[in-house]
Image (spheres, helix red, strand yellow):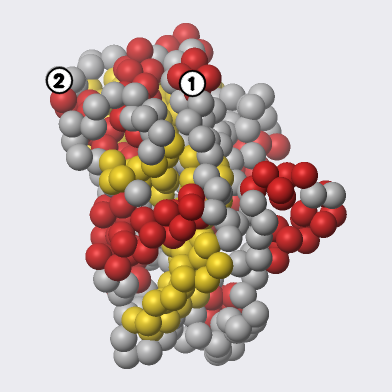
Amino acid sequence: MAFLLNSYPAVYRAKYSGAWKEEFIEKPHKTQAEESEMPEAERERLVASRNYFDDMPLVSYSTQYGLSVFEGLKALPQKDGGLAVFRPGKNAARFFKSMKGLYMPPFPEDMFVKACLEVVRRNATLGFTPKYSQDWEKDSFSTADAVYIRPFTYSEGGVGVKLSGEPWVVIVCTTVGAYFEPGLKGAVVSERVRATPKGTGWIKSASNYVISAMAKYEAAQAGFMECVYLDAVERKYVEEGSSCNIFFYLKSGELVTPEPGDTILAGITRESIIELARDRGVNVSERRISIDEAMSESRECFVSGTAAGATPIESLTYNGKTAVFSGGRCGDLTAEIHDTIKAIQYGKKPDTKGWMVRV
């Protein structure tokens, strides 16, 4: 599994009450080596203790109504032995926009970046961070580990349906590996609707991901690695994967990805891939693409996201018909994009874009 509920000891927390008040909290821990040697039951209790705060309300607008926003970004072990975070300023801007979209007092972008870097640094000082492995290069970092940084909001206590005026911002870290489960292949078009016009699809809101979890589970039960959503109104245009953006490389040489709007989240990995593809002379279009065009005209397909990276989709099934892309293997453009972005992230290739921020 990509994500394990195994929070590192150092946690960041800020509370809004007219102004933001920050604190760093060090949860119970031993060294990572010592914890690995502990009896399993004892180690599980220690690890579990880091996943809770006793002074935050049990009943809140977040726990009752999913009124929360979050981000996901990575700090990646570097080939030179260091640690760097991928484009944290972009996550900071989206977090600000998401909080504002839910009428919360938005978290300042500079505070977000500084807090993410510092909480990663503190955990690294305590020995809680993966080390660069030469073996990761063998599969172009497809199975490489990274520090997953999860900033999220948590509302003040409340039981009625209400917005949050005095939220917390919490940042935790854990180790993350490969996102998709091995053994499953291809994608299927879900009958579910992820987001509707004038809704919260453009916000990285916790409530949006209930549908994603259900649709992805249903896809896995049917033997598919991923699911794909169509638009809510006409039910003909491709929008996203389960929790990631999607790209189609057409036979014409055009690389198409749906344009972000109020039903599609603007992904940071997505934006980076568009830039890398254009650098290579690829004609990239951000436009609507019908499911019929995607299935009949695509030679490659891949999804993108913080956890997914650039992951190839070998086939797409819709209404009982299946389109197979690039002979059922990873296409050349997909592989080039994947390899390039991973090599930049892990410090194997020079970061000419200024995307990586050292911890």
> Which label number is shown at residue 47?
none
Image quadrant assignment for residue 186: top right
On the image, the x and y values in percent for residue 168 come to: 45, 77
In the rendered image, the vertical position of residue 60 relative to residue 244, given as above or below: below
> Quick one: 171 or 281, which is closer to the camera?
171
Residue lying farthest to the top in this orientation: 327
Look at 35% across and 13% down and name the residue there: 332
Look at mark 1 in the image and give the residue it sits on.
134
Q: Position of residue 147 (x, y in %)?
A: 49, 45
Q: Number of numbered discs present?
A: 2
Which type of secondary structure does the marked residue at label 1 adopt?
Answer: helix
Residue 307 visible to the viewer: yes
x%, y% of residue 150? Answer: 47, 57
Residue that mark 2 sits on = 281
- Asked where in the image residue 291 lies, by quadrant, the reply is top left
Residues marked 1 and 2 touching at CB (< 8 Å): no
Q: Is residue 166 above or below residue 349?
A: below
Q: Position of residue 219 (x, y in %)?
A: 62, 38
Front one among 350 and 268: 350
Residue shown at 42% from the left, 39% from the top: 76
Looking at the image, is mark 1 or mark 2 earlier in the sequence? 1
Toward which corner of the image does residue 169 lie, by quadrant? bottom left
Q: Which residue type does callout 2 highlight?
A: Gly
Is label 1 or label 2 in front?
1
Give the alpha-carbon distance from disc 1 to disc 2, as whole Å.
Answer: 31 Å
Residue 227 in sight here: no
Q: Quadrant of the N terminus?
A: top right
Which amino acid type is shown beneath numbered disc 1? Gln
Where disc 2 sits, the SS reads loop
Question: Residue at point 46% right, 58% down?
Answer: 122
